Image (cartoon, grey):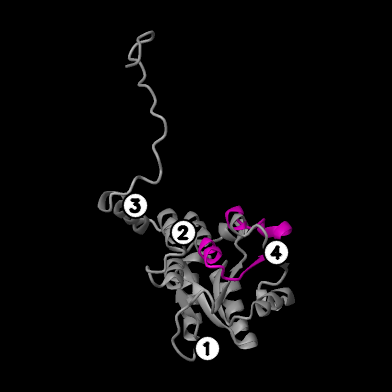
Amino acid sequence: MLTKPELLTPENCQVIFIDQQPQMAFGVQSIDRQVLKNNVVALARSARLFEVPTTITTVETDSFSGHTFPELLAVFPEAPLLERTSMNSWDDQKVRDALAKNGRKKLVVSGLWTEVCNNMFAFSAMAGGDYEIYMVADASGGTTQEAHDHAMQRMIQAGVVPMTWQQVLLEWQRDWARREHYDAVMDIVREHSGAYGMGVDYAYTLVHGAEERIPHGPRLAPVAANEGEAAV
């Protein structure tokens, strides 16, 4: 339970990805699955950029859920995958030990499914480990929209803080005068933030006159109108 409002910083929190696996994603109906994966990867890239400790858990990989999204693993190729059988990650000692080792009580959570694995973990971590939970709603998914929404509401009533991945990223950046991560943050925004990313491209090129960041490929000669006619 939060005792006072406090912004997230790269130094005061850690991230956990719960069961971002294909069979779990197959069951998601509360968000477009491709959008879900986009948001998960964006959150992962943000955590990597700001060097926020990150834990990845999996459930029944070989018997049911399949392997973790390769795009997520590409961001953290060295991260151990904490495999378990319980629906609740908190029930696994390996997970509890990994979180405790990081020494940060603010937990940013992205997982599948919202109403099962996320909900159980949040309540258990709050009660059993005195953690504060920041649930990234758009990097999580439920089996129906209703299931996701009611699970979020239930968690909010218990003190969980709802967030979006972009909100997390910008809270970590906080000040555009902090130049160390500026370009990398803009790269994440451009690749994952939809309209905001397009706006950044527009501002870079047409407003500020920067060169286009993605060069045009080689131009192809036009196809001749008739066979044997030279292209012009």
Secondary structure found at label 4:
loop
Q: Is residue 214 magenta?
A: no
Characterize the local packing of mark 2: few (<14), some (14-19) or many (20 or more) Cα atoms within 10 angstroms: some
Which stretch appears magenta? Answer: 44-73
Residue named by callout 3:
201
Asked whether, in this view, residue 40 is left or right of residue 218, the answer is right
Nearer the observer: mark 3 or 2; the answer is 2
Residue at 52% across, 88% down: 1
Secondary structure found at label 2:
helix
Say what amino acid the circle numbered 4 marks.
Pro
Characterize the local packing of mark 3: few (<14), some (14-19) or many (20 or more) Cα atoms within 10 angstroms: some
For the residues labelled 2 and 4, the Cα–Cα distance comes to 25 Å
CB atoms of marks 2 and 1 within 8 Å: no
In the rendered image, the quadrant that contains the C terminus is top left
Per the rendering, the mark at residue 1 is: 1
Residue named by callout 4:
80
For the residues labelled 1 and 3, the Cα–Cα distance comes to 40 Å
Say what amino acid the circle numbered 1 marks.
Met
Residue 220 vs 195, above or below: the answer is above
Say what amino acid the circle numbered 3 marks.
Asp
Residue named by callout 2:
184
Nearer the observer: mark 2 or 4; the answer is 2
